[in-house]
C-alpha cells in the first residue's frame, strides 16, 4: 500500500518512522517532509496546505492512504477533497475540524452535549465583550475564535489586561481574521494533561495520556511555545480519571458530533484541566500533539497503519493496540531566540552519536539537508530527542545523554522536561 503523510515537523517524522515499520506499507511518501523524514520516506516538494497539489499528486501516483499531520490542511478541507476523489485518509472533515478551527463552535458543542468545560461567552462586538469581562471579573481568559498559530489565548490577570486583549484582537486585528470573534471564558485552575483517542465517528480507542511543557524556560517560566518537551504516560491522569474523561468528555463529543451530522474521525486530542471539581476540557485539537505524538509512537508496539485506516473504514471496534509498558520522554532542541526570532542554516553535528544512546531516537522537527550528509537547522523547534525506558526518570537521563552528544552551539533546550512526573515518583 502507498501511504502519503502530510506535514514537516517532529510529529510527522514520528508518524513516518512508525508507518515505515508497517508490513502493509510498501511505499511511504511525505509532503513536504524534512531531512530526518527523508531517511524513512520519499519527500515530495508540496506544501502541507496546498490542497489541490496534494489531491493531484495522490491521483497521479495512486496513493492508497493519506495521513494528515497538522490542523491547517484539515480545516481547509483536505480530507473532504480526498474523499470526493475516492482516496482514503486519516483525519476529520473540515466541518468536524471546526472543533479546533473555531473555539466558539467547540464551546457550543460542549454546552449542548453537557461536556464539562469553562463557562464562556462568544462575542463579535468589543463593547459587549468588555461588559461581559467586567461582569465576570479577573482573572479571565480571552481567546480568538480562529486559529492563531497557538498565540490566540490570553490569560488576563486583571480587567485592564483583558480589555486590552479585546482591543488588540478586535480593533487592532493583531491576530487577523482569527480574532474577529472572541471566546471569553472562566479561568480554571489545576494540573494540565492531554489525552488522545482514535475515533471512527462512533467508537473511541484510547491511546495514551501525555503532558507537555509549553513554556520556553526551566521551571515552566517565560513565553509560551508550541511545546518544549513531553512525556507519556502522564501519571497524574490515573486509570480512573481516564475512564471519567472518556465517559464524560470524549464519548459525548463523538456522539454529539455524529448527531450534528458532522461525524468526527481521526485522532481527537483533549487538552484537560484537572480541576478540584474533576477533569474539564480546555480545548480540542483535531490532530496529534507535537511533540506528544513522538512519545506515543515510541511506546506503540502494534502496527499503527491498520488503526489509522480503521478510523476511515469505521472498523475501529476491531482494533486492539499494544503498548510497551514503559515511559517515553522527548526533549525539544530549539534555535536560540525561539519562540521569538531566530536564525536558520546552522549545521547540526553529532546526530549519529546521539542516536546510539540506548532507547533513543532523534526525530527531526525543523531541518533540511545541506551538502553531502550535512543537516541544517531550518525552524524554531528543530529536533526532538526522544527516549524510552522502564521509568520516566531513566527516560529523562537517556534523552539528556543524547542531547549532550549533539554539536549545535546555536541550539538550546529545557533541562527539566518531565519534572512533574519525576517529582510525583
Ligand atoms: P490553548 O491554546 O487553548 O491550549 O490554551 C493555551 C494554554 O492556556 C492552555 O494550555 C492553558 O494553560 C491555558 N488556558 C486556556 N484556557 C484556559 C482556562 N479557561 N483556564 C485556565 N487556563 C487556560
Ligand atoms: N504540544 C501542543 C500541541 O501540539 O498543541
Image: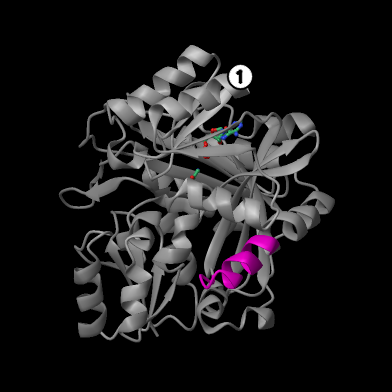
Residue 151 point in image, percent of width and height? 40, 34
The structure residue drawn at horizontal position 39% and vertical position 28%, both measured from the top left corner, is 126
Name of the residue lying farthest toward the right? 240
* Whether residue 295 is situated above or below residue 64 in the rendered picture: above
Secondary structure mostly seen in the magenta stretch: helix
- The stretch in magenta equals 252-263
Using residue 241 as the reference point, say whether residue 385 is left or right of it. Answer: left
Residue 192 point in image, percent of width and height? 66, 37
Using residue 186 as the reference point, say whether residue 367 is left or right of it. Answer: left
* Whether residue 216 is situated above or below residue 22 in the rendered picture: above
Q: Quadrant of the N terminus?
A: bottom left
Residue 152 point in image, percent of width and height? 41, 35
The structure residue drawn at horizontal position 58% and vertical position 56%, both measured from the top left corner, is 109
Q: Residue under label 1, please give it.
A: 137
Residue 125 point in image, percent of width and height? 39, 33
Instruction: Give the quarter of the image for residue 383.
Output: top left
Q: Is residue 250 visible?
A: yes
Magenta residue check for 257: yes
Q: Is residue 295 visible?
A: no
Instruction: Give the quarter of the image for residue 213.
Output: top right
The structure residue drawn at horizontal position 59% and vertical position 40%, both measured from the top left corner, is 398
Badge 1: few (under 14), some or many (20 or more) residues near its Cα, within 10 Å? Answer: few
Q: Regarding mark 1 in the picture, which secondary structure is present there?
A: loop
Q: Quadrant of the C terminus?
A: top right
Viewer-nearest residue: 9 or 393: 9
Using residue 175 as the reference point, say whether residue 392 is left or right of it. Answer: right
* Whether residue 246 is situated above or below residue 62 in the rendered picture: above
Using residue 330 as the reference point, say whether residue 20 is left or right of it. Answer: left
Amino acid at each position: 500500500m502507498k501511504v502519503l503523510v502530510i506535514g514537516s515537523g517532529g510529529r510527522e517524522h514520528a508518524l513516518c518512522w512508525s508507518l515505515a515499520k508497517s508490513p502493509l506499507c510498501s511505499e511511504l511518501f511525505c509532503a513536504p517532509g524534512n531531512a530526518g523524514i527523508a531517511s524513512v520516506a520519499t519527500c515530495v516538494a508540496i506544501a502541507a496546505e496546498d490542497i489541490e497539489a496534494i489531491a493531484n499528486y495522490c491521483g497521479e501516483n495512486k496513493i492508497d492512504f493519506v495521513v494528515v499531520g497538522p490542523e491547517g490542511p484539515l480545516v481547509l478541507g483536505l480530507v473532504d477533497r480526498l474523499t470526493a476523489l475516492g482516496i482514503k485518509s486519516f483525519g476529520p472533515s473540515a466541518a468536524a475540524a471546526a472543533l479546533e478551527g473555531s473555539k466558539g463552535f467547540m464551546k457550543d458543542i460542549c454546552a449542548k452535549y453537557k461536556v464539562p468545560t469553562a463557562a464562556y461567552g462568544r462575542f463579535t462586538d468589543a463593547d459587549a465583550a468588555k461588559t461581559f469581562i467586567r461582569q465576570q471579573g479577573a482573572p479571565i481568559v480571552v481567546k480568538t475564535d480562529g486559529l492563531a498559530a497557538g498565540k490566540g489565548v490570553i490569560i488576563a490577570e486583571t480587567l485592564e489586561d483583558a480589555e486590552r486583549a479585546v482591543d488588540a484582537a478586535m480593533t487592532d486585528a493583531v491576530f487577523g481574521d482569527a480574532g474577529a470573534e472572541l471566546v471569553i471564558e472562566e479561568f480554571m485552575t489545576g494540573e494540565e494533561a492531554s489525552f488522545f483517542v482514535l475515533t471512527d465517528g462512533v467508537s473511541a480507542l484510547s491511546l495514551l495520556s501525555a503532558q507537555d511543557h509549553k513554556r520556553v524556560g526551566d521551571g515552566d517560566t517565560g513565553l509560551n511555545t508550541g511545546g518544549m518537551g513531553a512525556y507519556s504516560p502522564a501519571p497524574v491522569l490515573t486509570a480512573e480519571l481516564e475512564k471519567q474523561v472518556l465517559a464524560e468528555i470524549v464519548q459525548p463529543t463523538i456522539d454529539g458530533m455524529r448527531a450534528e451530522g458532522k461525524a468526527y474521525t481521526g485522532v481527537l486530542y483533549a487538552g484537560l484541566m484537572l480541576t478540584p471539581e474533576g477533569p474539564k476540557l480546555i480545548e480540542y485539537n483535531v490532530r496529534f500533539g507535537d511533540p506528544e505524538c513522538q512519545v506515543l509512537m515510541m511506546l506503540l508496539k502494534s502496527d499503527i497503519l491498520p488503526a489509522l485506516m480503521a478510523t476511515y473504514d469505521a472498523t475501529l471496534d476491531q482494533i486492539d493496540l499494544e503498548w510497551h509498558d514503559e515511559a517515553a520522554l522527548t526533549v525539544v532542541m530549539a534555535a536560540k531566540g525561539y519562540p521569538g526570532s531566530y536564525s536558520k542554516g546552522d549545521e547540526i553535528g553529532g546526530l549519529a552519536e546521539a542516536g546510539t544512546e540506548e532507547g533513543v531516537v532523534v526525530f527531526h522537527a525543523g531541518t533540511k539537508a545541506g551538502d553531502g550528509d550535512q543537516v541544517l537547522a531550518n525552524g524554531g523547534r528543530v529536533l526532538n530527542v526522544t527516549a524510552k525506558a522502564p521509568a520516566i526518570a531513566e527516560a529523562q537521563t537517556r534523552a539528556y545523554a543524547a542531547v549532550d552528544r549533539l554539536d549545535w552551539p546555536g541550539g538550546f533546550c529545557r533541562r527539566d522536561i518531565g519534572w512533574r512526573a519525576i517529582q510525583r515518583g
